[in-house]
Image (cartoon, rainbow, N blue to C red):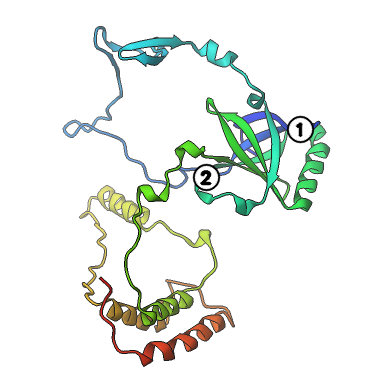
């Protein structure tokens, strides 16, 4: 049974619309260890209090929202006034157009939701829009008001419903040049061949269900050891030796990749899965072996 919907309204395609409801597709807190703030002496959990410079401690019920238009000058906006603000996307997901999914840079993707029909009467119209979109193989671009702001979203058909993803605005995206400077290095062909060999040997399939948060496991081990009254179990990362020469590091990496993985670190490779990688290795190896050891690029 589905949980409580976070939003209800209408999905509209031109003149066709149907009631829909929105559900979060992810949970940021699922399975996560969280800590409370305690006083170091009493170990009592501390409480957050609101403080006014003139009145001292105040109740949350006495708080209002204000917009600062000049230094230390605010205009107060009431909750009732905010509730009265409505635009079309407050209640309707109006599809503006359709694009190829590959046209959207992943950096714009934000939060993901599931979109379902709201009640049996809506199912036929919902199914018509869903099947029509599935056949054209496009992603819809629309708008919706969530958490007090209008968001650009994509609506993508999946089995039995839609995946709705909010998009960041262009103003929120920083250009790569704000963090990345042009690289000014000359790369040796044999180094590239060996790096390609390593990449080919690590070809795999995306399997997020196989990921385990090792830091979370280390935290849990620490907490359990302290609850049991024993010595704290502190996990330390293995020390790694400094590799001065890049070519040596590449050769060592290839040697490591040739070793069979431990049973607990990976699944058995499927038959034929290594054939493409082996072909690339065979092509790259003679070229790398024919050259002398090259110094590391500076």
Left or right: 275 in relation to 139: left
Label 1 vs label 2, nearer the camera: 2
The x, y position of residue 171, in whole percent, is 47, 36
* Of the pair 231 and 133, the residue shown nearer to us: 133
Q: Looking at the picture, how far across and down is residue 155, in whole percent?
A: 66, 42
Q: Is residue 220 above or below residue 51?
A: below
Q: Could you tell me residue 18's position as x and y percent?
A: 77, 32
Within 10 angstroms of label 1, few (less than 14), some, or many (20 or more) residues?
few
* Picture quadrant where residue 66 is located: top left
The residue labelled by disc 1 is 119
**Distance between the Cα atoms at labels 1 and 2?**
32 Å
Percent coordinates x, y for residue 118 in the rendering? 73, 33
Compare marks 1 and 2 and give the one earlier in the sequence: 2
Q: Please determine whether, in this image, residue 232 is positioned above or below residue 193.
A: above
Q: Is residue 228 left or right of residue 173?
A: left
Residue shown at 66%/51% (left/top)? Answer: 100
Residue 153 marker: none
Secondary structure found at label 2 = helix
Which residue is drawn at the image coordinates 50% and 83% (left, top)?
280
Categorize mark 2 by other alpha carbons within 10 Å: few (<14), some (14-19), many (20+).
Answer: some
Q: Residue furthest top?
A: 55
Residue placed under numbered mark 2 in the picture: 108
Q: Residue at image x 53%, y 25%?
A: 148
- Residue 57 or residue 173, whichever sits in front: 173
Q: Quadrant of residue 25?
A: top right
Above or below for 251 versus 51: below
The quarter of the rendered structure image containing the N terminus is top right
Mark 1 secondary-structure assignment: loop
| Residue visible at 33% across and 78% down in the picture | 250
Q: Is residue 75 left or right of residue 274?
A: left
């Amino acid at each position: 049974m589905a949980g409580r919907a976070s939003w209800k309204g209408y999905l509209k395609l031109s003149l066709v619309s149907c009631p829909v409801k929105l559900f979060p597709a992810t949970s940021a807190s699922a399975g996560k260890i969280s800590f409370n703030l305690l006083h170091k002496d009493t170990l009592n959990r501390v409480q957050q209090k609101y403080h006014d410079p003139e009145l001292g401690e105040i109740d949350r019920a006495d708080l209002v929202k204000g917009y600062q238009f000049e230094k230390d000058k605010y205009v107060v906006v009431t909750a009732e006034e905010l509730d009265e603000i409505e635009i079309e996307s407050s209640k309707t997901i109006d599809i503006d157009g359709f694009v190829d999914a590959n046209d959207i840079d992943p950096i714009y993707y934000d939060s993901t939701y599931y979109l379902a029909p709201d009640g049996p009467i809506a199912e036929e119209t919902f199914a018509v829009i869903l099947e029509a979109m599935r056949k054209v193989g496009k992603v819809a671009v629309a708008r919706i008001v969530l958490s007090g702001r209008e968001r650009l979203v994509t609506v993508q058909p999946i089995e039995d419903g839609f995946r709705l993803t909010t998009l960041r605005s262009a103003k929120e995206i920083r250009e790569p040049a704000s963090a990345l400077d042009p690289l000014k290095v000359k790369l040796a062909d044999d180094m590239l061949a060996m790096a390609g060999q390593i990449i080919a040997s690590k070809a795999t399939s995306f399997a997020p269900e196989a990921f385990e948060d090792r830091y979370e496991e280390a935290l849990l081990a620490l907490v359990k050891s302290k609850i049991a009254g024993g010595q704290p179990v502190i996990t330390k990362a293995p020390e790694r030796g400094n590799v001065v020469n890049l070519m040596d590091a590449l050769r060592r990496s290839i040697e490591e990749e040739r070793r069979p993985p431990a049973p607990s670190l990976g699944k058995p490779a499927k038959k034929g899965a290594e054939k493409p990688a082996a072909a690339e290795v065979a092509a790259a190896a003679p070229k790398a072996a024919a050259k002398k050891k090259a110094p590391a690029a500076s």
